[in-house]
Amino acid sequence: MFRLPKGVRKTGMPIRTAPNWVKPTAEYGPLAAFFLAYLIYGLMPATAVLLATTLIALVLSLSFERRIPWMPVVTAALVGLFGGLTLWFQDETFIKMKPTVVQAMFSVVLLGGLAFGRPLLKKVIGAAWPMDDLGWRRLTFRYGVFFAAMAALNEVVWRTQSTDVWVTFKVFGLMTLTLAFALAQAPLMSRHRLPDEAAPEQASGRE
């Protein structure tokens, strides 16, 4: 069976790939700008900086990838909603609740999809890491529970701790916990990884 070369669309035009620096800049740039602005000016100006840099990051992703990346779009929409409410009412409660809503939404989407027999993580990272269906179900369930726990933890932190503690938790705590959790899933993903299909394709090509 004829296959298009990698990096070529069905139209025959090459796919434009973004430089390596675009994704980390778009993901972590707004968070870094928020933290620096908070240290210098306080929470309200930092919220305005977060709104502006999130929009810039979204435009940056769109300009390089030439498609609508759904995760940054959802994140930008929620930042715009809760950040806008924070500035409009001058009430920091809204921006502090944003991680709770985001994490809870991810949990509901993943666990809800799993309840209907659709492990949605497979659609997100399935092409990069092929696994069997049992692996995707287990991984999706774990992430769903993890996001629910992060939502609950954010509620505890912002309701019981100072703003300084919450900002540190938001910028460093959530990211560190998410990274640690992702690394902890490596054994599961390795156990359920599908065999490499490159060898059969090469064998059929030699025939």
Image (spheres, grey):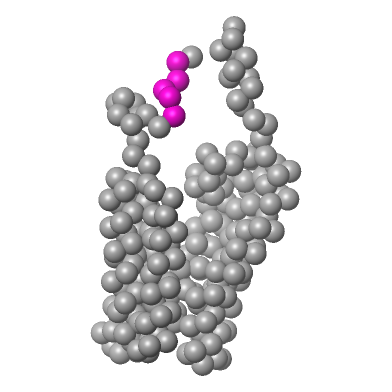
Q: Which image quarter holds the C terminus?
A: top right
Residue 76 vs residue 18, the one in the foreground: 18
Position of 153 relative to 61 (above/below): below
Q: Is residue 26 visible?
A: yes
Identify the image quadrant of residue 204. top right
Residue 124 vs residue 3, the one in the foreground: 3
Residue 31 vs residue 157, the one in the foreground: 31
Identify the image quadrant of residue 201. top right
Which range of residues does the magenta coloring cover?
Answer: 2-6
Total marks shown come to 0
Q: Residue at x 57, y 51 (%)?
A: 114
Outermost residue, top side: 207
**Magenta highlight: main SS:** loop
Provide residue 140's location: percent of width, then percent of height: 60, 53
Outermost residue, left side: 88
Q: Residue at x 38, y 70 (%)?
A: 30
Q: Residue at x 51, y 84 (%)?
A: 166
Position of 196 relative to 104 (above/below): above
Provide residue 69's location: percent of width, then percent of height: 37, 51
Q: Check if residue 162 falls in the magenta segment.
A: no
Provide residue 54's location: percent of width, then percent of height: 33, 67
